Image (cartoon, rainbow, N blue to C red):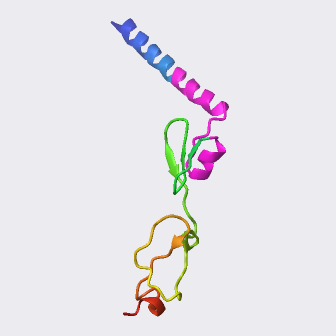
């Protein structure tokens, strides 16, 4: 009965050693997991040409490009004499206006 316990302990130690060696191999190969849109692009992920742009890694994770300044994606037309309350959401569309954001155009 004592031999079985020793055999089981030895097998467990071998299994642990094999798993840790496999982990070291993936680190040695330079495998880097992307954690952002920019890192995904750097590791040659697939870039989806939609708005906002998305990048898909080889293992299927998706990262969305964060827009730093949302004002750049719309045109500020405050002061043109027309209240732009209903606007499209694509790049280049007018920015949404309201009495609070553009009282010149939206005072009724």
> Residue 35, image x and y in percent?
55, 48
Question: Quarter of the image holding residue 12?
Answer: top left
Residue 86 relative to residue 73: left or right: left
> Residue 37, image x and y in percent?
57, 51
Picture quarter with the C terminus: bottom left
Closest to the observer, 80 or 48: 80
Which residue, as the protein is rendered here, is positioned at the far front?
A: 81
Closest to the observer, 30 or 59: 59
Q: Is residue 39 magenta?
A: yes
Picture quarter with the N terminus: top left
> Residue 72, image x and y in percent?
58, 71
Q: Residue sitting at 52 percent across and 49 percent down?
A: 63
**Is 93 placed above or below 101 here?**
above
> Residue 27, image x and y in percent?
62, 33
**Is 52 placed above or below 57 here?**
below
Q: Residue sitting at 58 percent across and 66 percent down?
A: 68
**Is 55 placed above or below 85 here?**
above
Q: Residue sitting at 55 percent across and 79 percent down?
A: 76
Which residue, as the protein is rendered here, is positioned at the far left?
A: 1
**Is 8 placed above or below 22 here?**
above
Q: Is residue 12 magenta?
A: no
Question: Quarter of the image holding residue 97?
Answer: bottom left
Total residue callouts: 0
Magenta span dominant secondary structure: helix
Closest to the observer, 57 or 50: 50
Q: Which stretch appears magenta? A: 17-44
């Amino acid at each position: 009965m004592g031999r079985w316990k020793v055999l089981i302990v030895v097998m467990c130690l071998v299994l642990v050693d094999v798993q840790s060696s496999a982990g070291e191999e993936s680190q040695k190969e330079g495998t880097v997991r992307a954690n952002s849109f920019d890192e995904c692009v750097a590791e040659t992920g697939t870039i989806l040409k939609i708005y906002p742009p998305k990048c898909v890694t080889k293992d299927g994770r998706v990262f969305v490009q964060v827009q730093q300044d949302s004002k750049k994606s719309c045109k500020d037309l405050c002061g043109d004499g027309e209240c732009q309350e209903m606007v499209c959401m694509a790049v280049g569309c007018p920015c949404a206006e309201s009495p609070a954001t553009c009282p010149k155009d939206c005072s009724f």
